[in-house]
Structures are given as C-alpha cells and as structure tokens.
Amino acid sequence: MRKLLLNLLLLIAVLAIAFFAFAPRYFDSTNNALDGKPLEAVSEEAKALHSTLTIVDLHSDTLLWQRSVLEPVEYGHMDLQRLQEGNVALQVFSSVTKTPTGQNYDNNSADGDNVTLLVIGQLQPVRTWTSLLERSLWHATKRDRAVKESGSVFASVNDGSDLESLLTDREAGAKDRTGALLSIEGLHNLEGKAENLDVLYDAGFRMAGLTHFFDNELAGSMHGEEKGGLTPFGRDIVEAMEAKGMIVDIAHLSKKATAEVLTMATRPVVSSHGGVQATCDVNRNLTDEEIIGLAKTGGVIGVGYWEGAVCDTSPAAIVKAMKHIRDLVGIEHVALGSDYDGTITARFDTSGLVHVTNELLKQGFIEEEIRAIMGENAIRVIRKGLKPASELKQSISTEEAVE
C-alpha cells in the first residue's frame, strides 16, 4: 500500500512537472500562430523604403506569455530580434489580465477567466493568481527587467523625453534600439478603485482601453452582455487619464460607450487594434460614423492583421482597410495595430512587416503616406497624449511643496 501511494505521488509529481514545463509553451505556440499561406515576393523598392521608416505598432500582447521579449523563439509573433528585423522603432505592449471562458465576439459574461490558469501554469508570483491589478504590475516588471537586461537596446517610453531620445538615437544610426510603451487591455484591473489608476501610472502604463471582452465597472463592451455606455466611474477615469497623460483606447468598447468617449475627449483617442466595418463587417470593427468621430479628436486607428479585423490575413486585406480610412477621413488617421501574440493567427510575424510596406506601394500609396501609416501618425498621437517630462517634474515639485 505504501509503495502504491509513493508511486501515485511520483506520478502526480511527474505530471505536474510536465504541465508546468510544457503546457504554457504549447498553449502559447498553438494560439499565436502563422497560417502558412504564401506571401508575394517583396520588391527592392519596398525593402529600401522600409529600412528608412519609423515604425510603430500600437498593440501586442507578448507580455502575457511566459517568455521574455529578449529571448528569440521560433513560435509566437514577436521578440526583440524580430522587432529589430522588422525595423520597429516603438512597440506598445498591452497588459491582458482577464478573458472570459467561451470567449466570442458577440456575448460574454464577466464570470470565469481563462487567464488565471495561464498565470498559475506559468508559475507567476502568487500575488498575481487572484489580483488583476497585480497581473498588470507583473507585466510592467517584465518590461522593466527586459529594458535593464538589454543594456541600451530595449528602451522604456514613459514620457515625451523618452520618446524623443529614442527617435534621436535611431536617426543617429542606432536602428537596433526599440522602444516599449505600456498599455492595458481593459481597466477591470483597477478592481473598482480610482486610486489604482495612480498605481498603474506609476508602474509606467501610458495607454489603456476601458473594456476587453466583457462589461465592467467602467463601461459596456462590444462583446459583453449589456453593451451599455460609460458609467459615472468610467467617465471619471477617462477624465483622470487625460489629465495624467494616459491615452484613451476605444478598442473593444461598446458602440454607446465609444460615442460617449469620443464626445467627451479633449486629447487624441486611439483604436489600438481592429478594423473597419466597411471592409470587414464584424461587430468589433469601427463604423464610418465612429471613424469620423475618432478623427475629430485627432486620433488614429491601428489596423490589425488577423481575420476578425480585416476578414483575411493577407497584406491586401490590411491595406484595403487602411485605404478606406484614408479615403474617408485622411491618411493622418491610419496606423498599425497588429494584436500580435493576442491569440490570433496572422500571415507574417513582426519580422515580416516589410510585406505591409510592399503592399502599400503596390496599391499606389506614395512615400509620404506610407511613412505616416507605418509610424509617423502614431508618433504624433503619442506625443500629444503623453505628458512632457517638464510637466511631470513640475507636478512632482508641486506635490512636494504641498506635503
């Protein structure tokens, strides 16, 4: 009997080791995939132009996974090596803290959570097992550790001076230097407390969407049960974000809440990742009315690369959505929003961004338009959204004087 018990315990131990060692990587590699479909050959003109671009991607979920962004891997969509190969100047890394069981685009309850099992399986700090706020703080820690361990190659972007330093260095020839700005996919990680916005800001978060795949205390989600508008708490948080220098992201937000945010916004608003209903009639994508409303704030739309955003994974489908936005409200409102490592299937990973440049040229976009789409528009909006370092220092001095 004792031998049987020991054998059973040994089996449990082996299974546990196997789970923690292999399950997170398996889930990561199978959910962040490439479809393997063929891509057109890239022209020499596209390669030459691409190498001179300042490229910004407004949305990636890479920090959700066990791997370090500094570690080159043969699965998933993004790591520092592939960012460098794609000539990416600035990557926005989002913090995903909760996703509903049975996740879909149409109707999701806030009950249940897929991320908890992943958090435990990845052996993250115990504090992250039950706290959504702590999950985001862990993602910020991962970003900051990667920056420190990379030397000067991977750089935090927390304020205007960080951004300008990054761009200056790249213009001076440091093309391998890539910036990392932190965002949040759904402010349910506030856990209902307005003061937690300060905690997240202090950790380095500078952009945030109000909702993800379910309704929360701030607003209705396009994929939630009620799909309502902003709550009083949500309105307070939007105002606080703009005052602090945090960019408001309407991706995943309900139609009613989107309209309300666009009406009250005083700074440029982004839709960090998605598409447009005119070219891909999916509920999460923006209507023409919403595109026009967002453009009035001076914001940008990050066009995604997966089927739910553009109804295909081809560069042609991506550019088709971009062309619609350009023709409706102007080239200055088009940007990149890959949703890489966000449990999507894409045609190419971040090292293959030259395929977007190639397709833009093929579709007749001129050089100035391509530069705007691939990064200059996003840089403009981020500049306007972040507080400059001088203003931050002034705020700190004022707070010290009061104390």
Image (spheres, grey):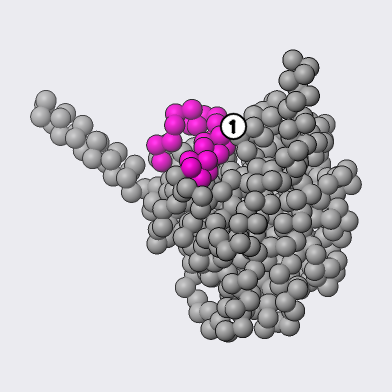
Residue furthest front in the image = 172
**At x 28% / y 40%, what residue is drawn?**
17
Type of amino acid at the residue the image marks with label 1: Leu
Read off the magenta span.
122-148
Residue furthest top in the image = 403
**At x 59% / y 32%, what residue is drawn?**
133
Residue 103 against residue 112 in the figure, above or below: below
The foreground one among 394 and 93 is 394
Query: Taking the image as drawn, is residue 110 in sight?
Result: no
Rendered-image quadrant of the N terminus: top left
- Residue occupied by mark 1: 133
Residue 290 against residue 85 in the figure, above or below: above
User: Where on the picture, by quarter, is residue 313?
Assistant: bottom right
Residue 124 among magenta residues: yes
Image coordinates for residue 109, horizontal then vertical, percent: 64, 41
Query: Taking the image as drawn, is residue 81 in sight?
Result: yes
Rendered-image quadrant of the C terminus: top right
Image coordinates for residue 284, horizontal then vertical, percent: 71, 56
The foreground one among 108 and 184 is 184
**At x 56% / y 48%, what residue is drawn?**
155
Residue 28 against residue 239 in the figure, above or below: below
User: Where on the picture, by quarter, is residue 132?
Assistant: top right
The foreground one among 303 and 160 is 160
**At x 74% / y 35%, what residue is drawn?**
392
